[in-house]
Structure formats: C-alpha cells, structure tokens
Amino acid sequence: MVDVKPLIAIVDFGLGNLYSIKQACAFVGLNAVITSSKKDLLNSDAVILPGVGAFGEAMAALHRLDLVSVLKDIGFSDKPLVGICLGVQLLMTEGFEFGRHKGLGIIDGDVIRIDCPKEGSHVLKVPQIGWNRIYRPNDGTTWDNTLLEGIPENTYMYFIHSFIVKPQDLGVILSISRYGHIEFCSSIKYRNVFACQFHPERSGTRGLEIYSCLAERLKKPRMF
C-alpha cells in the first residue's frame, strides 16, 4: 500500500522564507508545494501563509494575485491554516505599518509596532532579531491538542519582527513572549488556525517539532 503524504500549499506572494519552510515540511514527511495558485490552495490538505516584510505590501500582493478571498474562505473552513511571522499579522483585521491597511480579518485585532522596549533604562533595538522564549498565558491556557503540544514552556524560538499582533479576544492567545518590558502574543490558536510570530523552520529541533506535530495531526481527521 502506497503511503500518501499530506499535501501542504505554501503561499507564494513574493515575501517569505519559502524554501526553508518547504525543507522543514519535507523533513517531517510532508509533501509541500510553493504556489500562488488558488486551485493548489483549495486542493491541499493544509495551507501555510508565511511572510517577511511590510504588512501593506503583502496585502497588496495578495490582492494582486487574487488570493484574498480564497484565504478568507480557508480561514473560516475546516482546513488547517498556519501563519508564520508576517503571516500571523496578515490574519488580523488591520495593520498600522506605513499607514493603515486592512488585513484578511480572519481574527479580530490589530497589528502594531513594538513601542520602545526597555530593560531598565536601556532601550532595546527594534526589530527584535534573535532567540526569545515562549510562555503560556496566565489564564490556564494549555498547549495540549495544539501544534505546541510537547513543546516545553520557556522554549527558545527564533524571531525577527518590528510589529506584534493584538487580538481582541484574549482567548485565542496560545503563547506569549517578552521583549524588554513589553509582553506580546507570540502565537494564536483559533478554530482551524495556528499562527506564530516566530519562525519554527529557523528554531532548531523544537521548531521542527511543530511541523512534525502538523504532520501527525493531518494523518488523523479532526485532530487539528
């Protein structure tokens, strides 16, 4: 019997760490295609929305490629949708980078700049570039049955960003991180959506565990 690998569509809109994500998918046994085709997105088992760059430019590219409506449809369906870095920001209602721009609106909330983070009297650099820890929110949130299942709290993940998401519903926040005195949402779980501000594909063994968890869940219907 032939083992059919789940098909992952990695959205190509010109801004993203696409090949590193594809390699991470292949490492855990997922068949990934980099694509800007609506047909590929609809025919896939899961969609990854990556991104590095400016919010407004990214949304303009998605509109130009006519991918906004299909991504919204997927975001409100049962198909797993994974947002990475800029990808988590694009899921929100609005972004305020170089003006005011509408996002996909799959998750209510805004995308705002990291505002003067400080450690004591020392002002930290923005963007944040490098390793930072992820924590559970202090509201009883568990990582069981999510893509962070099995990841220890306080694990380091790799970040590169100047903006952060502020969901209206605090219940969708799966993990938080801290940069200086600023505490921010570093990942989200909402229905069929998992999205993170960090880069799992650049976060070593622990980051690859997230892709491995995705692969395992795609083999089990209704487990995402």
Image (cartoon, grey):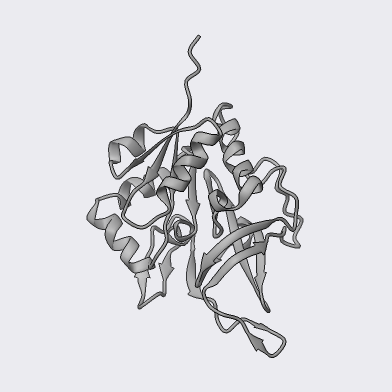
Q: Quadrant of residue 96?
A: bottom left
Q: Nearer the viewer, residue 202 or 118?
A: 202
Residue 131 visible from this viewpoint: yes
The residue sitting at the bottom extreme is: 121
Viewer-closest of 165 and 210: 210
Q: Residue at x 52, y 65 (%)?
A: 160
Q: Residue at x 75, y 50 (%)?
A: 152
Quadrant in which the C terminus is drawn: top right
Q: Is residue 41 left or right of residue 1?
A: left
* Image location of residue 94, percent across then percent down: 41, 68
Residue 118's spot in the image, x, y percent? 65, 83
- Against 109, residue 72 (above or below) is above
Residue 42: x percent and y percent?
A: 35, 36
> Looking at this rendering, what residue extends furthest in the left direction?
64
Q: Position of residue 150 (x, y in %)?
A: 72, 43
Q: Is residue 135 left or right of residue 188?
A: right
Q: Quadrant of residue 98?
A: bottom left
Whether residue 76 can be seen here: no
Q: How many marks?
A: 0
Q: Is residue 132 above or below residue 4?
A: below
| In the image: residue 4, left or right of residue 175 | left
Q: Between residues 49 and 23, which one lies in front from this camera angle? A: 23
Please report the residue visible at 49 percent of the width from the left and 59 percent of the height from the top: 85
